[in-house]
Image: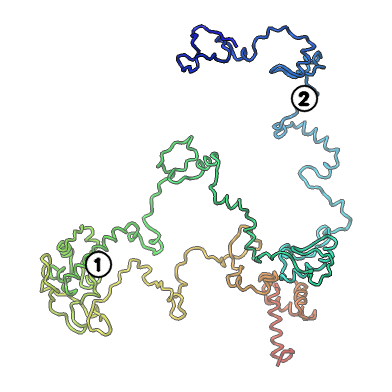
Amino acid sequence: MSSVTLPGIAATGIYTGKYKDWSPDTRPAGKLTATGDTALSCLKPKDNRPPSADVIRRFRATLRPDAGQMRVFYGKASDPHRQWAKDMCHGINTQSSANAGELANPDPKTLFQQKKLDRKELIYASHLKAPLGTSHNQIPCLPKGLNKDEFTFGIPTELDIGAGGLINPNKTYAEVEKESAVGHELYRDTHSDYDVGEQHHRNYTSTGFNEKSKFGIPTPHSNDGRKVRQTLRWMSQAQQEKATKIVSKRVDDFRERTQPQLGTVHDPIKDTLKVAPDHTFGILVKPDEYGAGDLLHMRPPGTYLRGKDRQRGVMAAIRQHLKKANYHNFHDLLAAFRHYDKDGSGKIKMQGLREACAQYHLPVEPELLEQLMDYCDTNRDGCIDYLEFSNFLNWKDKMPSGFGPKTETPKTPVTPKSAPSPHVRTPHSGSEVQVSQEDLHQKTPQSAESTPRRLQKQIDMAIGNHRTSSSMINAVIGGVDTRDFRRYGVPTIRTDLPGPRIRRVDDRKNYGDESDAYGLMNPSIFSRRGVFEKDFLLPRTLEEIKEIFTNVGVRMTGENVETLYQTAAKQHPKGHVSVESFRGVLDDVLANQVLEGKHPLAI
């Protein structure tokens, strides 16, 4: 291979400057060409050979065609039809028919076109017998004298057991095996119908051979089908349930756009409607001033308790603080009351209550003091007397009343249990407390110590006399009559509405004609046979009554049946007779015969 030196390349080697030539004495392989040549010129160098003859070129195009050229058989190389055969199309040119849009929505016809089409359709017999919009009249084809209202075609089919009885017959396992064994030997010889594990009968005469023995071990099974679910589930399905669900990105994007997401506003049209993340649709509805409890207890306006939970909680906290202060600083209720009674009038006024709260380091606003005074003042005289003070601002059962036994007169002023604290002032000794003997009761039947009577503070006066104890409401003797109580809601069994003769499919109301829980747990013998209570109450004719009682085994003459039927018809305002009414009349007649001694069962 000769080496060609190009301009700009030293004779020392082509790798000078970029790579180190470790073998400068060895001549490099390959062929150096001038720059500017294309890949096509490299793959197809110039061929200066003379062109081949057409005969040789024809065979060469068949056996070894040039790159990118189609292989042509040498017998077709000189065929003149090859020039236009590549553009030739076979077949016949057809015109395009009506598209789907024209067939689905054809152009409306004019009145003249419609009349012309109707005139063409009149020649057909089907148009005359059954024109468009009417059914085919087949009455002329029926035989003469045939009653079309009562006559039916076909053969009546007797009602047999259903598919459930065929699949799961009401038979034991032994009975099913016994029935399947009938004819088994014949099918075994004709169809080779062998049971699972059964041996082929080859007529062996060996004494140790038992033809009834079976191969294998019986498979454990359960008649309730608990193993069926495991056999129907393949191992791959169980693994797929445990594996992570693979969802396509398109489905995930659709769910994210159409289903509400946690913590975000559901905006299915977020591409067209831009709203803030905290935007809320709708109109703010002003809440009512009364709540559900106010409606149930029928509180009048002005006494609603909705929205007063904080106020009532603060009031309870103030009362609890005063109860603790009185219990720890005074020996009895009378001494505590005289501490609050600053002017010695025998009643606690607003000023005395305010000073007592200040001494106990209980800062209370004037509005809360007024509410506390209003809460404790049950007789509405503007002050708090000894009885109200003992019930609402003290634990009266844990402290002595300050009075002796109920028969004694009130004692002299009682000093506190211990020396009062520096912020508690000694009560006035001249205050007189007016308490009647009716307001004092004995703490226990065994003790003579008195205690103030209990005052009832009822918020809901409308239900003050109601007893909510289940033992009183359900009591047989001395129970509460609930007939006058207010009823809420709609009754479950609508006995106030008459049951419709024909009920709709979506009518789920119970009109009192459905069975209760007792009837479902203990069905009658008639319901097991498909006969229900309404079947006994339907009006029936004399022939139907006679046929029903004859089928059940009641033997009566025609005269007796007619007499009993007329007797039962007189008991109904419209003269209807049902199976139940006829049976009642029959039972009465038989009972009279037994009493008169005319019946065979009479003693």
Image depth: mark 1 or mark 2 in front: 2
Compare marks 1 and 2 and give the one earlier in the sequence. Answer: 2
What residue is pinned by disc 1?
376
Q: Is residue 218 above or below residue 524?
A: above
Which numbered marker is on residue 95?
2
Q: Is residue 244 above or below residue 413?
A: above
User: Relative to the observer, which residue lies in front, 555 or 1?
Assistant: 1
Q: Position of residue 237 (x, y in %)?
A: 60, 51
Q: Amino acid at mark 2?
A: Gln
Residue plotted at (78% across, 67% down):
180
Rendering quarter of residue 478? bottom left
Q: Amino acid at mark 1?
A: Cys
Q: Position of residue 69 (x, y in %)?
A: 71, 17
Alpha-carbon distance for marks 1 and 2?
105 Å
Q: Is residue 275 above or below residue 2?
A: below
SS for callout 2: loop
Q: Position of residue 455 (x, y in %)?
A: 28, 73
User: Relative to the observer, which residue lies in front, 222 or 43?
Assistant: 43
Q: Are marks 1 and 2 in contact (CB under 8 Å)?
A: no
Residue plotted at (56% across, 66% down):
493
Disc 2 crowd rating (10 Å Cα; few below 14, some 14-19, many 20+) is few
Say left or right for 424 vs 280: left
User: Relative to the observer, which residue lies in front, 338 or 567?
Assistant: 338
